[in-house]
Image: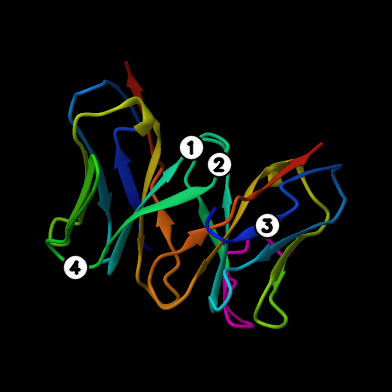
């Protein structure tokens, strides 16, 4: 357990529905990252925050994806109008003063 | 844009044997990371390599970095079954330290 928590751990939804995932970082970690991992692949970077500022979002997969970190603590990742191709593991990672990113357990999304 | 390639993609080895996983990256990367992932689990940080010639060891695993060759290696010594997992290398170091991962090496250690 790295101290990064994610909720829910599993989400099954129907195509077209909206879903939201939450990430709670290690306390005092100012950087928070979202990645997506599909089966048999390495994680793919989506977006990151430095405190509450979203400093990179050009890698979000489409305008259906959005992320927030309103108070510089927890973060949410929302996917609107889900598609079957969105099925994947969504991983959150956080880092503080060191360069190491600590990953949470992930949220596995299945879109039917 | 940084690209990271690992080989082999799959490695089956006997307990007690030695082997090396290779990680090549396409452009300058200030930092090179190694992670371990067990099936259905998240990623566990193994090593962070920050400079040319850096070598780090933990138990039966040793990682090294050659920035001139744009190559990192993860060497496994006298493998044991508990090392069976998927190993990822990742490059970072640009603004924000966004990680670019390789495709992973699935390691299976047989008794």
Residue named by callout 3: A6
Residue named by callout 1: B38
Quarter of the image with the N terminus of chain B in it: bottom left
From which residue to which does the magenta span run?
A48-64
Quarter of the image with the C terminus of chain B in it: top left
Q: Residue at x 14, y 65 (%)?
A: B52
Label 2 sits on a secondary structure element that is loop
Q: Residue at x 68, y 61 (%)?
A: A62
| Between discs 4 and 1, the one toward the N terminus | 1
Pointers 4 and 1 in contact (CB under 8 A)? no
Q: CA distance from mark 2 to mark 3?
A: 13 Å
User: Is B6 placed above or below A93 here?
Assistant: above
Q: CA distance from mark 4 to mark 3?
A: 33 Å
A27 or B98, nearer to the observer: A27
Is residue A51 on the magenta stretch?
yes
Mark 1 packing: few (<14 Cα in 10 Å), some, or many (20+)?
Answer: some
Q: CA distance from mark 4 to mark 1?
A: 28 Å
Chain of the residue under label 2: B
Q: Nearer the viewer, mark 2 or mark 4?
A: 2
């Amino acid at each position: 357990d790295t101290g990064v928590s994610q909720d829910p751990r599993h989400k099954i939804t129907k195509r077209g529905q909206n879903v939201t995932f939450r990430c709670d970082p290690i306390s005092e970690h100012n950087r928070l990252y979202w990645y997506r991992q599909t089966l048999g692949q390495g994680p793919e970077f989506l977006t990151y925050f430095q405190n509450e500022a979203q400093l990179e979002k050009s890698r979000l997969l489409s305008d259906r994806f959005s992320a927030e970190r309103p108070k510089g603590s927890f973060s949410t990742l929302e996917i609107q109008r889900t598609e079957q191709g969105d099925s994947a593991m969504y991983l959150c990672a956080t880092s503080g003063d060191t360069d190491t990113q600590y990953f949470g357990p992930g949220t596995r999304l299945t879109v039917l | 844009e940084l690209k990271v390639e690992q080989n082999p993609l799959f490695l089956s080895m006997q307990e007690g044997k030695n082997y090396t996983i290779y990680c090549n990256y396409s452009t300058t990367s200030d930092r090179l990371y190694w992670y371990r992932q067990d099936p259905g689990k998240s990623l566990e940080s193994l090593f962070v390599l920050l400079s040319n010639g850096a070598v780090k060891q933990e138990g039966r695993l040793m990682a090294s970095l050659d920035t001139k060759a744009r190559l990192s290696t993860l060497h496994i010594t006298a493998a044991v079954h508990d090392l069976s997992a998927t190993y990822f290398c990742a490059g970072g170091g640009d603004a924000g330290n966004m990680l670019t991962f390789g495709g992973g090496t699935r390691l299976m250690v047989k008794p």
